[in-house]
Image (cartoon, rainbow, N blue to C red):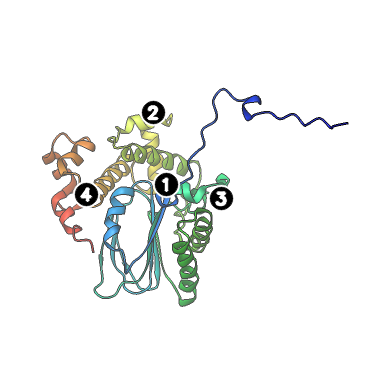
Amino acid sequence: METPALPTFSFDAYPQTAEPLPLKPPTDALAQLVVYRREERFATCRQHIELHRRAFYKISLFGEGGGTFTLNDEVISVAPQSILLVRPGTALSWRLHEGRQTGLYGFFSPDFYNAGLLPGFQLQAVLAGGAPYVYHACTPTEYAALWESGEQLYAQQAHPEKARLYLRLLLADVRPWEQAAPRGAAGAGHTVVQQFLHLAEARLAAGEPALPLDAYAEALHLAPKYLSALCRQATGKSAAHLLREKVATEAKVLLTGTALPIGEIAYRLAFYDVAHFSRWFKQAAGQAPSAYRAQFGAYK
């Protein structure tokens, strides 16, 4: 007796969803992480700062060379065998020392670092000090450990999972060198001040002008005078003073990190004309906007 053949069905005979779910394209690692050797690709650094000034951290390993770096209103001297990590939204400019420059520099997004991590282990928890940068002049042993992770990060940047591992190892070494928050800054008041500053930063990052102080106080369900008192308690500065600092920093970021005309920068920051913005900026920064931009225009 002949055994009957097993029935076969085409794929279309099985139940199907009304519309197949679209496949998500693979993440392009180079859109979230890029690393260069300092001796090879200096010319791209300005380009990346202009493209990624908001969302990306910048990390630099200095083997030989160094220079003078201006971060917001602070000037630091960067030595050989050191590391510099700069947060997004920081007004960054520099003048390099003459001679050979070696090491690595790169840009990475918080999303790249945070992929798959619980909130307590994400970048905002790892680097919780709030300073605009972390700088450390290393011992030979410290720099050797950083360089090992940095070299692997450079080599694996096209392979997201491997590159992410080495980035996390690198920042684990950087974390102990981050400046701690000032004593007395912790507590509910400090949290409210951070929320206020984040609201202001978010508007500026979106290309929108800062709001009047009353609007931020209302968003935080506080009286303006009480918000200002909390700011003084946490930072020694009034809320209005902190808000002016944020606008001044944004102006510096736009002047040094973009090619926007000064008139457009003035418009984005809600100044009614260029002359008004120029007077305000000169009072805040000690220089006219055009002079400030020219001072940091010669990137190497």
The mark total stands at 4
Q: Which residue is mark 4?
A: 255
- Residue lying at the far right in this picture: please name it: 1
In the image, 208: left or right of 181? left
Q: How far from the left and from the top, in percent, is residue 64?
A: 34, 74
The image shows residue 154, relative to residue 235, as above or below, that is below
Indicate which disc, 3 or 4, sits on the residue closer to the N terminus.
Answer: 3
Of callouts 2 and 4, the N-terminal one: 2
- Label 1 CA crowd tier, 10 Å (few <14, some 14–19, many 20+): many
Q: Which residue is mark 1?
A: 234
Closer to the camera: disc 1 or disc 2? 2
- Residue 86 appears in view: no
Q: Is residue 246 above or below residue 220?
A: below
Q: Nearer the viewer, residue 231 or 160?
A: 160
Residue ID for mark 3: 121
Q: The residue under label 4 is which amino acid type?
A: Leu
Amino acid residing under circle 2: Glu
Circle 2 is placed at which residue position?
Answer: 218
Q: Are marks 1 and 3 in contact (CB under 8 Å)?
A: no
Labels 4 and 1: the sequence-earlier one: 1
Residue ID at (22%, 61%):
299
Q: Nearer the viewer, residue 268 or 58?
A: 58
Query: Which type of secondary structure does the marked residue at label 2 adopt?
Result: helix
Q: Is residue 115 rendered to the left or right of residue 194?
A: right
Q: How far apart are the two marked residues, 4 and 1, measured between alpha carbons?
A: 30 Å
Label 1 and label 2: CA atoms lie apart by 20 Å
